């Protein structure tokens, strides 16, 4: 079975440019999460979607960040304009149930973003 | 103070050694507990859940002490392939859903 798919795997861009990260969750999963990982702050939740609806976006750093989930099989995280401090690994994860105490989140391979 | 705190590491141990990682969490509303493993430049993957009664999976043993808000992971007979970062994770109900809170991770390096 295919796992969570993310693209691109690596992105190098210049400050001020728009960056779009893409995620395809595991088929049948109804929960999708975007995380950011840095050495300084570890793994942080940015936004959580359930059934394509954003439920918790309190972790989105600022208005430069936006996320969408137009359908059950696709989500995007956009940064506009990008800044060097946005450099990090961005992970997408999906899980199958919202209310279970034993939800397992399956992570994609991540997108390593470098903003120069 | 972070909600989930772990030993900073790194732990450098020889093959065959037994190594223990500790983790504390500050929110008593936390309901479920996990250890995730993250290999270098890879994504986190669930290693095992942690139950109050303690649980074992091969060479790995996890323990939870709710009264002390303390979680541990014991690895026996370490293998080179155990080298990775181990993330302590708690789950609590927040904002209408089960949210995972990740510790910063403890790096393990097993050498020949």
Image (cartoon, coloured by chain):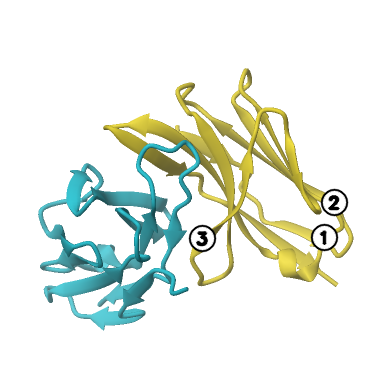
Q: Are marks 1 and 3 in contact (CB under 8 Å)?
A: no
Q: Identify the hue of chain A.
A: cyan
Quadrant housing residue A66: bottom left
Residue B57 on image: x %, y %: 75, 50
* For residue B45, above or below residue B30: below
The reply to whether label 3 and label 2 mark residues of one chain is yes
Q: Quadrant of the C terminus of chain A?
A: bottom left
Task: Name the one closer to the observer, A68 or B69.
Answer: A68
* Residue labelled with disc 1: B78
Assess disc 3: are there few (<14), some (14-19) or many (≥20) residues with their C-alpha within 10 Å of its C-alpha.
many
Q: Earlier in the sequence, mark 3 or mark 2?
A: 2
Residue A83 on image: x %, y %: 19, 67
Cα distance in 3D space between marks 1 and 2: 6 Å
* Subunit bearing disc 1: B
Quadrant housing residue A40: bottom left
Cα distance in 3D space between marks 1 and 3: 20 Å
Q: Which mark is residue B44?
A: 3
Residue B29 on image: x %, y %: 45, 23
């Amino acid at each position: 079975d295919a796992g969570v798919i993310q693209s691109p795997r690596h992105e190098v861009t210049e400050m001020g440019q728009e960056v779009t990260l893409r995620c395809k969750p595991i088929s049948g999963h109804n929960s999708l999460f975007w995380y950011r990982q840095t050495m300084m702050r570890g793994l942080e939740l940015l936004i959580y979607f359930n059934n394509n609806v954003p439920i918790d976006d309190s972790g989105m750093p600022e208005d430069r960040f936006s996320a969408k989930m137009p359908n059950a099989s696709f989500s995007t995280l956009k940064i506009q304009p990008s800044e060097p401090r946005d450099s990090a690994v961005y992970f997408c994860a999906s899980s199958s149930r919202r209310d279970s105490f034993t939800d397992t989140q399956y992570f994609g391979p991540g997108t390593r973003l470098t903003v120069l | 103070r972070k909600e989930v705190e772990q030993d900073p590491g790194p732990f450098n141990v020889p093959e065959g050694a037994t190594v223990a990682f500790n983790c504390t969490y500050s929110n008593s509303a936390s309901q479920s507990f996990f250890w995730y493993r993250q290999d270098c430049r890879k994504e986190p993957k669930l290693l095992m859940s942690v139950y109050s009664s303690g649980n074992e999976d091969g060479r790995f043993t996890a323990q939870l002490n709710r009264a002390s808000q303390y979680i541990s992971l014991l690895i026996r007979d370490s293998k080179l392939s155990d080298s990775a970062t181990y993330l302590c994770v708690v789950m609590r109900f927040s904002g209408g859903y089960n949210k995972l809170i990740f510790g910063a991770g403890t790096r393990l390096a097993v050498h020949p």
